[in-house]
Amino acid sequence: MNMKEKLKILIIDDEASIRDSCSQVLSKEGYITETAEDGSVGLEKVKKTKPDLVLVDLKMPGISGMEVLESLKEIDPDIVSIVITGYATIESAVEAMKLGAYDYVPKPFTPDELRLITNRGLEKRRLLLETATLRQEKKQMEENFISLVTHELRSPLIAVKQYFDVILDEEIGGKLKVKQKEMLGRASERIDGLMKLVNDWLQMMGIKEEEIAKRSQDFDLKPLLGEAMELLQPLADKSEVALQLKPLDDIPRAHGDKITLTHVFLNIISNGITYNRKGGKVTVSLREDGEFLAVDVADTGMGIPEESLPLIFDQFYRVRGKGTRKLIGTGLGLSIAKRIVEAHKGQIKVQSTLGKGSTFTVLLPRAPQHKKQKSKKSP
Ligand code: ADP
């Protein structure tokens, strides 16, 4: 199949001689050419015939070439446009490039110059279309995979987990032998681990910066932290770890997406509990830090070896050791937290002393200044 024959070029120029000569040169090259005598006819033809490349005269009566350029992008963002500049002024060519034109040909031009620039423009078009197709395919694959994991993995896991719970409850299935109970209990824990992995992975695939930006709003960190801690209180009780929130009263509001940020704090605080010791403590506090608001989550746990510190935000990384071997985890939580915080243009840091404890700090942007002033005035 000869790709060249299929490519369509539209020439928009009010001068008949230019339209005809361009059309002749480019048809000889094997392209399908069409012409339009002004901007509005041109745009109509763009909508109808969907050309790959458009040659546009900048100076035309009626709709100007610049306006045509702007509208072209709305019709097809991957269309390649080349402007024909009558005055050969660099300024207007630059202006046109800013509006998305790919290149320009100053009048008068030779057939060779036209061929060269057009061929280059069409190569650009080919690359743009290829990129768009690949992007679409990648998105489709991701979506298929997410739905596969959700339906084919997560749903059966939930069902298996429920059966385990019923059996372990001993009410419907009858009394279990001690050994059976112990083995089923361990199997059930492994299912918990698998479920955590699937959920973490799904969450990671779902982090989209644009969506975070769309959902972002000004909010108070204090109640958000309070809620996260309330949710983790049962885990803290079970682990015999005390939770404490130490907020200052007039901390400015933060700006961000409450849903994903709640996940960040749930993760860091639950790590503070999990990697702690019996009778230990997790203290959450809030402070201003330059242009940011800082949340510190300090624990009195096992700490993190210095050589592991640069790695703990990597996907699937877990510290190996006596203390951590038995603990269920995926090594995804902190990498998810980091991605979420960075999508907020914030930072996440850690300080740790082995055997003493760790402090994770999340730096988040404040609510924009003008909003802060407004809220101060209101009663
Ligand atoms: P997970 O907790 O599921 O293993 P994370 O990404 O949340 O995954 O944490 C990665 C690793 O970092 C953990 O496995 C643990 O070894 C270490 N870690 C995280 N938080 C703490 C903490 N507060 N104290 C000690 N070690 C921690």
Image (spheres, rainbow, N blue to C red):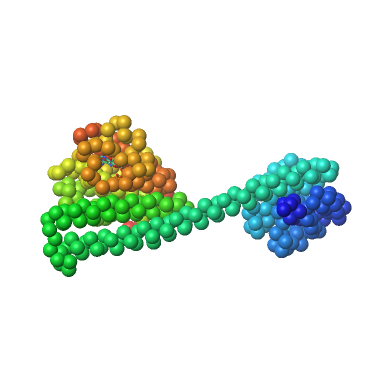
Question: How many tags in the picture?
Answer: 0
Kindly indicate the quadrant of the structure image that contains residue 62: bottom right
* Residue 280 x %, y %: 16, 42
Where in the figure is residue 233, as x and y percent of width and height?
20, 53
Whether residue 200 appears in this view of the structure is yes
Q: Is residue 372 above or below residue 355?
A: below
Horizontal side of residue 345 vs 72, given as left or right:
left
**Res. 278 image quadrant:** top left
Of residues 195 and 39, the one drawn nearer to the viewer in this rendering = 195
Nearer to us in this view, 64 or 56: 56
Q: Relative to the observer, which residue lies in front, 33 or 282?
A: 33
Observer able to see residue 283: no
Q: Is residue 91 left or right of residue 200?
A: right
**281 sits left or right of 17 in the view:** left
Residue at the limit of the structure toward the bottom, as seen here: 172
279 left or right, relative to 213: left
User: Image point 26% across, 45% down: which residue?
Assistant: 271
Q: Residue furthest right?
A: 17
Picture residue at 12% right of the left edge, 63% below the top: 175
Task: Work out which residue is located at the far top of the displayed protein and give it.
Answer: 307
Rendered location of residue 63, percent (x, y): 74, 58
Identify the residue at horizontal 72%, vertical 56% (top origin).
Answer: 51
**Image quadrant, ligand 1:** top left
Question: x, y (%) of residue 263?
Answer: 33, 52
The vertical placement of 188 against 114, above or below, is: below
Q: Quadrant of residue 199?
A: bottom left
The residue positioned 67% from the left and 57% from the top of the image is 71
